[in-house]
């Protein structure tokens, strides 16, 4: 970050247009690195952090922006593996619980929080359904205790009475309501913000994080890079090349076989759900393991998801919800609401594609495919990281870098993984957030860095109360290169068209204050 803003030397974790230019120039002067990571989603950012923290010269390249793809379209939850227990995938359930524990207690307590999940129970059948849901919640809580997550972080689940259900979820339908079950899981403040925090932490350990740089061709020992802003090309050598492009991995490695699954969410005004701060959950008819749920969201919004359907055909840069998916989500959640939602209540939708690893000969439904991850070495030597999910990004990164070190460096014991103990930029104990001298809104977004963001000069605000300081921080510290980067990935105002239109001028002003011209 510039000295003129904070009156001190630049932050080693700050990403900016100027830093990008410097590091591209340095790469041209010394075009040989230890690890080249392709893809700027959560997996790629995690790999860059893992490799850089081991002392490897690391470069991450991303064709668009950080969190441009699947990583910004999740449910914003840090799952503990309950669904995987239900399908007998005990290994990934345990792995999920471990990684949730690390995220919430050590790695990013400032970006996560406990979220109550409330399932209302209606007569008839409420006793049997409550017992079934209670059994699942109990198994999940057993995993929580097994990995050491304390009650102060995630509470024990249990039944709640009718009045408590209504208090927690005021919009709930009350006729035949007999009570409910309450479980707990982790929630991210925002998935794209997690990606940016991981990438910035990697940069602080010496990684070069280069957005708007695409890979024209790649082999196991290097790649041809193209600056999409200038068109300039640069060939670099690398001891290991890691493909972390998610559902697009097959474009670089023909040996990768994925069956993308589309998960769709609706965006509604939180007032339509009584401004509830819990996740209201409703079972999908005909399924014992699928649910539609609400998630409290920033800017006075709420999200409703989740679908899980095959995504056929060419993989788009930005997936879109189908009319059938919107209707299904409205119908299922409407069954537990006093006043069901209509199409008029849907402010926006978003959809993400999960990169599910599969045998191309398999006929499995995408909802039944494992969320396991794998490291696949192509005939050209490129290592592709496929499968997995957001919660387990750190373990995926560890396995990827372990594979790269073993196969390319041959001295794994000399370069052990450090990320289990490595907090992200801004990390601060959740219970001590009151010690940070900054507005609560900034603390929620930036953690321990909120005090520095608060010192930025004032200026025009964006929609939904997003401050000038948040906008300028996105440009000077978080690597936003154009207005869409700020709206769509750093603040998420771009989700709702009206918010986007009302905010563009304020974002342009933030670029002016930062002395930076947005790229076109």
Image (tube, rainbow, N blue to C red):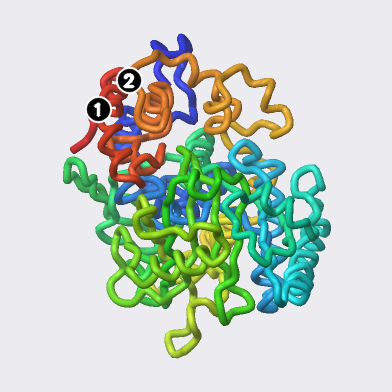
Tell me the quarter of the picture where residue 109 sits: top right
Residue 265 visible (yes or no):
yes
Which dot marks residue 460? 2
Categorize mark 2 by other alpha carbons within 10 Å: few (<14), some (14-19), many (20+).
some
Q: Earlier in the sequence, mark 1 or mark 2?
A: 2
The label number, if any, that marks residue 3 in the structure image: none
Q: Are marks 1 and 2 in contact (CB under 8 Å)?
A: yes
Residue appearing at x 49%, y 55% in the figure? 43
* Picture layout, residue 211 above or below residue 262: above
Q: Position of residue 240 (x, y in %)?
A: 45, 57
- Tell me residue 480's x, y (percent): 34, 35
Q: Quadrant of residue 142?
A: bottom right
SS at circle 1: helix
Percent x, y of residue 419 = 64, 46
In the rendering, which numbered label is found on residue 505? 1
Residue 251 is left or right of residue 199, and the answer is left
Spatial CA distance of label 1 from label 2 is: 8 Å
In this rendering, the answer to whether 158 lies above or below 226 is below
Q: Does any portion of residue 31 appear in the rendered image?
A: no
Please tell me which residue is depicted at 42% across the width and 57% down the height of the picture.
Answer: 266
């Amino acid at each position: 970050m510039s000295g003129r803003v904070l009156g001190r030397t630049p932050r080693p974790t700050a990403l900016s247009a100027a830093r990008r230019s410097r590091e591209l120039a340095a790469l041209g002067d010394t075009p040989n690195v230890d690890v080249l990571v392709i893809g700027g989603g959560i997996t790629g950012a995690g790999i860059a952090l893992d490799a850089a923290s081991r002392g490897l010269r690391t470069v991450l390249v991303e064709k668009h922006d950080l969190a441009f793809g699947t990583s910004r379209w999740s449910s914003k939850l840090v799952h503990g593996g309950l669904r995987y227990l239900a399908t007998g995938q005990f290994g990934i359930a345990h792995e999920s619980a471990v990684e949730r524990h690390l995220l919430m207690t050590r790695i990013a307590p400032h970006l996560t929080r406990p979220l109550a999940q409330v399932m209302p129970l209606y007569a008839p059948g409420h006793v049997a359904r409550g017992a079934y849901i209670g059994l699942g919640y109990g198994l999940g809580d057993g995993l929580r205790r097994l990995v050491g997550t304390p009650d102060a972080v995630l509470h024990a689940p249990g039944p709640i009475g009718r009045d408590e259900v209504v208090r927690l979820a005021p919009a709930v339908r009350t006729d035949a309501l007999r009570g409910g079950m309450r479980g707990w899981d982790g929630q991210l403040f925002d998935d794209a913000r997690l990606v940016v925090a991981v990438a910035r932490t990697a940069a602080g350990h010496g990684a070069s994080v280069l957005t708007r740089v695409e890979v024209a061709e790649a082999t196991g020992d290097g790649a041809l890079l193209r600056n999409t802003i200038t068109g300039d090309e640069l060939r670099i050598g690398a001891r290991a090349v890691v493909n972390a492009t998610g559902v697009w991995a097959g474009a670089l490695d023909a040996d990768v076989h994925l069956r993308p699954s589309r998960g769709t969410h609706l965006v509604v005004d939180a007032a339509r759900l009584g401004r509830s701060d819990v996740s209201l959950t409703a079972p999908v008819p005909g399924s014992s393991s699928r649910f539609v749920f609400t998630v409290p969201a920033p800017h006075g919004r709420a999200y409703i998801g989740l679908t899980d359907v095959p995504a056929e055909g060419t993989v788009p840069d930005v997936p879109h919800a189908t009319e059938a998916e919107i209707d299904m989500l409205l119908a299922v959640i409407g069954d537990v609401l006093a006043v069901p939602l209509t199409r008029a209540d849907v402010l926006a939708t978003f959809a993400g594609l999960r990169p599910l690893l599969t045998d191309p000969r398999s006929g499995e439904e995408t909802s039944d495919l494992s969320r396991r991850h794998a490291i696949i070495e192509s005939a050209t030597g490129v290592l592709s990281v496929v499968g997995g999910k957001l919660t387990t990004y750190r373990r995926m990164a560890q396995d990827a870098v372990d594979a790269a070190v073993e196969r390319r460096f041959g001295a794994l014991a000399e370069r052990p993984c450090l990320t289990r103990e490595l907090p992200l930029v801004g990390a601060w104990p959740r219970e001590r957030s009151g010690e940070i001298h900054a507005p609560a809104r900034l603390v929620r977004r930036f953690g321990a860095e909120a005090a520095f963001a608060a010192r930025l000069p004032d200026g025009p605000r964006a929609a939904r109360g997003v401050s000038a300081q948040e906008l300028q921080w996105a440009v000077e510290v978080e690597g936003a290169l154009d207005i869409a980067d700020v709206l769509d990935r750093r603040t998420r105002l771009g989700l709702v068209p009206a918010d986007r239109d009302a905010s563009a001028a304020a974002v342009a002003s933030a670029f002016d204050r930062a002395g930076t011209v947005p790229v076109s």
